[in-house]
Image (spheres, grey):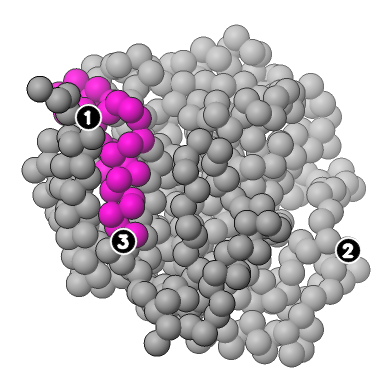
C-alpha cells in the first residue's frame, strides 16, 4: 500500500533545507525518490513501488534490510545505556565484545581495534596511527604516505589527500602534505597500456622505484585497497602484486595499510579480500558492511606489535572523537557479524560469486560490454565504444546514465560510475534474485544502446 507521507512537501522542503550527497550542478535535477521501508533485498518508496537493491544501500546492508536480530540488539542496548563516551577510565560491554570478535575473524596478527564512525574516518585514523607509530618509536622523519592513483580512501581532508581521484581532490587543494602517488594495479585500464602477461608487474616496479626515490626511511606507510572499490569497478590485483608490496614494506620497515571498507566482511567470498592472496596488513580499515548499515561505525584494526609500541613508549593514540566506540553501534555490528557467521554468508558469497560470474558473462553478447569482472558479491560491467581497443564511449557516462535510469523506472536500483556499472548486493541474495538483477541489467543495456544510437545518429 502507498505510504501516507506527503511526498511532494517533503521533496520541496529538502530542496530548500537539505544539502545532499552527490550534488551535481551539471545534470538536470531529477525528482528524488522518497524511500520509506526496506525488507531483505528490496526497498519501497512513498508511492508503494518496490525496488531490488543491487548495491546494498551503499555497500553497507550485507545481511539485508529489516533484520530483526540487529533491531533487537540495538533496542536492548538503548534501553540499558545508549551511549557514554569511551575513555581510558570507562569501557562498555558491546565495544569490548566487538573488539574481541574482530580479533577472531581478522587474519594474521590483527587484534587491536580503534573504533570510529565511518570509512573516511577509519582511513584517517589508520594514516594517523601509522605516522604516530613511527613517532613513538623515534623515527619522526617517517611522515610520507604512498597511495595509488585512482584510489579512493575517504572524504575527510586527510583521507582525501591519499586518494587518487583528481575530480574529488581538485576542489579542496592544497592537500595535507606527505601524500605521494604511485601507479595503480588495474590491468584493464593500465596507465601504460601494458598487458599483464608481459608487463613483469610494472606497477610493482613503479612502487619500488618510488620508495627508493622518496627515501624509504621517510615513508610511514603505503595505503591501498587490495581489491579497489566501485569507482574503478573492483579490479583484482595481478598475481604476485600484493605479496610484492608486503615484501617491500617488510624490507624497509614501512607499514602496510589495507582499506577494506568496501570489500571486507565476506564480500569477496572470504572474510577479507586480502586473504585470497595470503597477505595481511599492519593496519586494516573497515566500515560500511561492518555494522550492516544499521548504525554508523568503522574501525582501524592494528597488530599487537603496533599496539605494544605505544604501550612501551607510555603513549596513547590521540584521535579523540565524541562517538568513538559508540555502544549501540557496536551492538549493531556484533549482531550483524553473528548473522554472517550463523548463516554461513561468507561461503554463500563465494557460491554466489560463481553463479554471478556465469550469468554476468552472458552480457558479452552486447557489443557495448567491454569487461565483466569481480568476485563474490562485488561485480562491475564496463561499457566501451570498442571492445577490442577498449576505446571509451563518447560522451562519457551517457550510456551508463541511461542504464541507471531504465533500471529505476523498472524497479531496480543500480549504481553507475560513468559507464561503469557496479553491483554489490547483500550476501543473502538468492539465485532467483541474482537472475532478477542480471535479467534487468540485460534489458537495460539493450534499451540504453538503442536510445544512445538514436540520440547520436546523424540525420541523412
What is the spatial separation of the Cα atoms under label 1 and label 3, in whole angstroms? 22 Å
> Which residue is under mark 3?
409
Is residue 250 or residue 349 the one in the foreground? 349
Element type at mark 1: helix
> Magenta residues, as a range?
380-408
Q: Residue 342 lies in what quarter of the image?
A: bottom left
Q: Residues within 10 Å of mark 2 (few under 14, many from 20)?
A: few
Q: Is residue 140 above or below residue 121?
A: above
Residue at image location 47% in from the left, 43% down from the top? 28
**The N terminus - image quarter:** bottom left
**Which one is in front in this view, the residue at disc 2 or the one at disc 3?**
3
The stretch drawn in magenta includes residue 280: no
Give whichever of discs 1 and 2 has the lower sequence position: 2
Residue at image location 33% in from the left, 36% down from the top? 398
Specify the label residue 456 is tagged with: 1
Give whichever of discs 1 and 3 has the lower sequence position: 3
> Which residue is under mark 2?
88
Amino acid at each position: 500500500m502507498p505510504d501516507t507521507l506527503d511526498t511532494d512537501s517533503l521533496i520541496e522542503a529538502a530542496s530548500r533545507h537539505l544539502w545532499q550527497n552527490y550534488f551535481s550542478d551539471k545534470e538536470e535535477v531529477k525528482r528524488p525518490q522518497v524511500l520509506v521501508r526496506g525488507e531483505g533485498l528490496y526497498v519501497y518508496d512513498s508511492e508503494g513501488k518496490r525496488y531490488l537493491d543491487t548495491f546494498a544501500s551503499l555497500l553497507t546492508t550485507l545481511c539485508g534490510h529489516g533484520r530483526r536480530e540487529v533491531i533487537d540488539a540495538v533496542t536492548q542496548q538503548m534501553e540499558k545505556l545508549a551511549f557514554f563516551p569511551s575513555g581510558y577510565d570507562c569501557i562498555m560491554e558491546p565495544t569490548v565484545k566487538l573488539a574481541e570478535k574482530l580479533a577472531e575473524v581478522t587474519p594474521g596478527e590483527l587484534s587491536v581495534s580503534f573504533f570510529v564512525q565511518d570509512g573516511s574516518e577509519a582511513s584517517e585514523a589508520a594514516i594517523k596511527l601509522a605516522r604516530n607509530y613511527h613517532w613513538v618509536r623515534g623515527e619522526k622523519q617517517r611522515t610520507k604516505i604512498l597511495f595509488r592513483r585512482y584510489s579512493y580512501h575517504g572524504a575527510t581532508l586527510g583521507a582525501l589527500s591519499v586518494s587518487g581521484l583528481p575530480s574529488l581532490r581538485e576542489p579542496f587543494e592544497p592537500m595535507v602534505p606527505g601524500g605521494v602517488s604511485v601507479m595503480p594495479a588495474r590491468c584493464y585500464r593500465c596507465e601504460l597500456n601494458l598487458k599483464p602477461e608481459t608487463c613483469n608487474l610494472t606497477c610493482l616496479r613503479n612502487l619500488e622505484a618510488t620508495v627508493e626515490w622518496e627515501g624509504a626511511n621517510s615513508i610511514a606507510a603505503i595505503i591501498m585497497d587490495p581489491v579497489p572499490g566501485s569507482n574503478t569497478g573492483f579490479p583484482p590485483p595481478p598475481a604476485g602484486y600484493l605479496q610484492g608490496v608486503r615484501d617491500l614494506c617488510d624490507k624497509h620497515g614501512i607499514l602496510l595499510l589495507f582499506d577494506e571498507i568496501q570489500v571486507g566482511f565476506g564480500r569477496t567470498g572470504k572474510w577479507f579480500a586480502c586473504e585470497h592472496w595470503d597477505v595481511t596488513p599492519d593496519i586494516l580499515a573497515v566500515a560500511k558492511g561492518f555494522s550492516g548499515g544499521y548504525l554508523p561505525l568503522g574501525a582501524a584494526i592494528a597488530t599487537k606489535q603496533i599496539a605494544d609500541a605505544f604501550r612501551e613508549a607510555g603513549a596513547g593514540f590521540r584521535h579523540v572523537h565524541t562517538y568513538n566506540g559508540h555502544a549501540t553501534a557496536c551492538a549493531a555490528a556484533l549482531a550483524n557479524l553473528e548473522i554472517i557467521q550463523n548463516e554461513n554468508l561468507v561461503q554463500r558469497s563465494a557460491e554466489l560469486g560463481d553463479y554471478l560470474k556465469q550469468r554476468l558473462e552472458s552480457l558479452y553478447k552486447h557489443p557495448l560490454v567491454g569487461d565483466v569482472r569481480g568476485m563474490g558479491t562485488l561485480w562491475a560491467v564496463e561499457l566501451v565504444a570498442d571492445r577490442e581497443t577498449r576505446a571509451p564511449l563518447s560522451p562519457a557516462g551517457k550510456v551508463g546514465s541511461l542504464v541507471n535510469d531504465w533500471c529505476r523506472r523498472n524497479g531496480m536500483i543500480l549504481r553507475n560510475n560513468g559507464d561503469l556499472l557496479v553491483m554489490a548486493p547483500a550476501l543473502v541474495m538468492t539465485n532467483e534474485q541474482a537472475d532478477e538483477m542480471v535479467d534487468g541489467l540485460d534489458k537495460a543495456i539493450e534499451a540504453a544502446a538503442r536510445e544512445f544510437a538514436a540520440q547520436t545518429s546523424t540525420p541523412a
